[in-house]
Amino acid sequence: MVHAHDILDAVRKALQSEARIGFPRHPIHIALSAGDLILEGEVSDIAAKKLALERAAAVAGPRALIDRLRVAPAEWMGDGAIRDHMRDALLGEPALANCSIRVLVKGQWESVRTSDWSTGTIDVRVDDGVVTLDGSVVGLGLKRLAGVLAWWVPGSRDVINGLAVTPPEDDSDAEISDAVRMALEKDPMVDPSQIRVTTHDAIVTLQGQVPTESERDVAEFDAWYVFGVDKVINHIRVRA
């Protein structure tokens, strides 16, 4: 029989084996509850969060993995400011122009746009820096785009993308690659013409050349932000 302390020790070692997770500098509380494995704490960035979940899941096996990890925000904001930034990002995104949008303000839903030619409805609420998106949209691309916009809000600590896709679509590596390219194209800090994107088994590989280390990092984070991406391999080179 495998004892709980053996599982927790194995998870701890798995987290320590990945330098980007930053464990124990960014401590992650690991616990078992009713057979479920729980990860809780604050990590440095989205890559650390997803890598921690990946390493823990490999150890957890059939156990449910409960994600309570939060990302240190680029800028501390109150929930109201995060909500307003998210609202403005959705309103300003042309691809979502026909989506109806509601935001939760002091426990009440407020409509900020109602579309007669609706391609979906996006409901936004923010709790302790965590942006939750509910409703439905007409394609996986729009679901993923809304999620990336939420991650781009400087105060976001996590994004729970509960948007349904209606009618349902089969996901694929090609869909993920398309979503990553869209994120790169919409990011003013990145020149997407210099970056190639491929995906295999939800693992995204970035290749190409960019002028600065900063742009290289931004492109990688954009890929991590895309819903459904399990890992990002960054082979982008910085031109000398």
Image: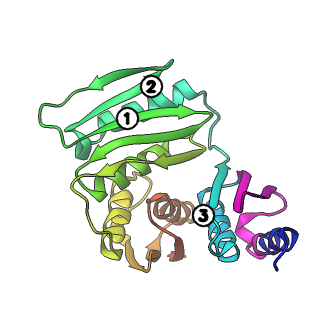
Within 10 Å of disc 2 (Cα), the crowding (few <14, some 14-19, many 20+) is some
Closer mark to the observer between disc 3 and disc 1: 1
Label 3 or label 2, whichever comes before in sequence order: 3
- Label 1's element? strand
Label 1 or label 2, whichever comes before in sequence order: 2
Q: Position of residue 232 (x, y in %)?
A: 52, 72
Q: How is the image coloured?
A: rainbow
Residue 137 colored magenta? Answer: no
Q: Which residue is mark 1?
A: 123
Where residue 104 is drawn, which disc sits there? 2
Where residue 202 is drawn, which disc sits there? none
Stretch of the chain drawn in magenta: 13-42
Q: Which residue is mark 3?
A: 50
Work out whether 176 lies above or below 137: below
View extreme (front): residue = 1
Amino acid on which disc 2 is placed: Leu
Please say whether residue 111 is visible from this viewpoint. yes
**Measured Cα–Cα span from mark 3 to mark 1:** 25 Å
Q: Dividing the picture into quarters, in which one does residue 189 lie?
A: bottom left
Q: Please report the residue visible at 12 percent of the width from the left and 31 percent of the height from the top.
A: 116
Q: Are marks 1 and 2 in contact (CB under 8 Å)?
A: yes
Q: Position of residue 177 (x, y in %)?
A: 35, 71
Q: Please report the residue visible at 44 percent of the width from the left and 60 percent of the height from the top.
A: 226
Please say whether residue 26 is visible from this viewpoint. no
- Label 2's element? strand
Within 10 Å of disc 3 (Cα), the crowding (few <14, some 14-19, many 20+) is many
Amino acid on which disc 3 is placed: Lys
Judge from the rendering whether residue 35 lies leftward or rightward of residue 97; answer left or right: right
Q: Are marks 3 and 2 in contact (CB under 8 Å)?
A: no
- Label 3's element? helix
Closer mark to the observer between disc 3 and disc 2: 2
Judge from the rendering whether residue 83 lies leftward or rightward of residue 62; answer left or right: left
